[in-house]
Amino acid sequence: MKKWKNLITILIMSTLLLSLSPQLVEAKPSVSARNAVLIEQESGRIIYDKAANDKNRIASITKIMTAVLAIESNKLDEKVKVTDTILKVEGSSIYLKPGEEIKLEDLVYGLMLRSGNDAAVAIAEYVGGSLDGFVYLMNQKAEEIGMTNTHFENPHGLDDHENHYSTAYDMALLTRYAMKNETYQKIAGTKSYRSENRDYSWNNKNRLLTQLYKYTTGGKTGYTKRAKRTLVTTATKNNLDLIAVTLNGPDDWNDHIAMYEGAFDQYEQVEVLSEGRIKGVEYAFYKDKVSLHSSFSYPVTEKEKESFRIKYNFIEPKESWRKGEKSPEIVGKAVVYLNDEAIKTLPIHYNQDGVKEEKGRFFDYFKHLFIRILGVQQHD
């Protein structure tokens, strides 16, 4: 009886030790910020979050939206005449003077690198026609992007309006959108810039970019007494592009580094589906004639690579198609599942004359492994 008790005790202890094994638990970064999120840029996958949908004041990371609207106005080469309105603006400044004429592009650099509140006002008046007009454009763009928990009331993020707020997640969405624009990428990733109106350079306040973390590609800092420290940064390593946001983060530089290092260590960008002919289709009508016109990649852990499932659904061919009538270009869809959750749908294209096989695609074996073993080839 005693032996059985000892055996049971050993089994219980073994189970507890296995449940506590660090190999079975993904490490979570220690983050000082009240609100935080880390997403992968291409897919938008959330890798880490901490109260990421809570509405809060956001300070000068507001200026990411201001920069986006300025860039999308297609007026960067135009000269802006600074008005007296800038005299009412407090806080960080690039020391504009009423009556001064300066390129809109220079104002955006001053906005992003030095967080100039006067630059934000000058941009808003020029691009939006007035501060109110520009704020309308800001909220219109936020709605377009899907920032459902955001409302802007000024172009700079100062605490002069009560109803000015966003979330860590919404600011990540905004940055994801902004990073698709090459001009924004260039400006946000610039360490130092000299305007033609100045005889000195503006150095970027983003210390993660300039000093602390070599994989940083851009971002925007922020601070007000009510919002505290806010920070948005982007970083790239090993083909993995990440976006980090923290709100009210007393140790935000280290927060971002911790989130990045954890993700770069645990996640890998994997090409799940390749562009080109879909192999393994045995249905005679579609065999060697269907393809994907784009590839699909997704960030996953090593363990998650075994959890993909791909399902191909095809339209049942009409008899008239077999007799020569033109079939539609889209004849089905490929649905990618991760842990039984659909994460991506791609259209399947049909070519009557057949699709040539593309060689040398890195993850061909990876893709076929799942088709062969999981038996996902289906015709609906």
Image (cartoon, helix red, strand yellow):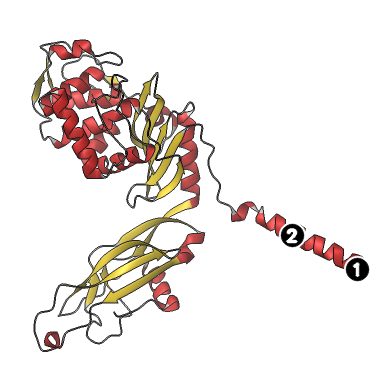
Q: Tag 2: Cα neighbours inside 10 Å, few (<14), some, or many (≥20)?
A: few
The image shows residue 170 at horizontal and vertical percentages of: 33, 40
Residue 36 screen position, x and y as percent = 44, 37
The tag on residue 219 is none
**Disc 1 to disc 2, C-alpha distance:** 20 Å
Q: Are the residues flagged by discs 1 and 2 in contact, CB closer than 8 Å? A: no
Check disc 1 and give the amino acid type. Met
| Quadrant assignment, res 370 | bottom left
User: Which residue is the site of mark 1?
Assistant: 1
Q: Is residue 334 left or right of residue 301?
A: left
**Residue named by callout 2:** 14
Residue furthest to the front in view is 162
Left or right, residue 341 beside residue 4? left
**Which amino acid type is shown beneath numbered disc 2?**
Ser
Helix, strand or loop under label 2: helix
| Image coords of residue 31 (percent x, y) | 51, 35
What residue is at 58 percent from the left and 52 percent from the top?
Answer: 25
Height in image: 144 above or below 285?
above
Residue 123, relative to residue 214: is it above or below?
Answer: above
Q: Nearer the viewer, residue 244 or 356?
A: 244
Q: Quadrant of residue 300?
A: bottom left
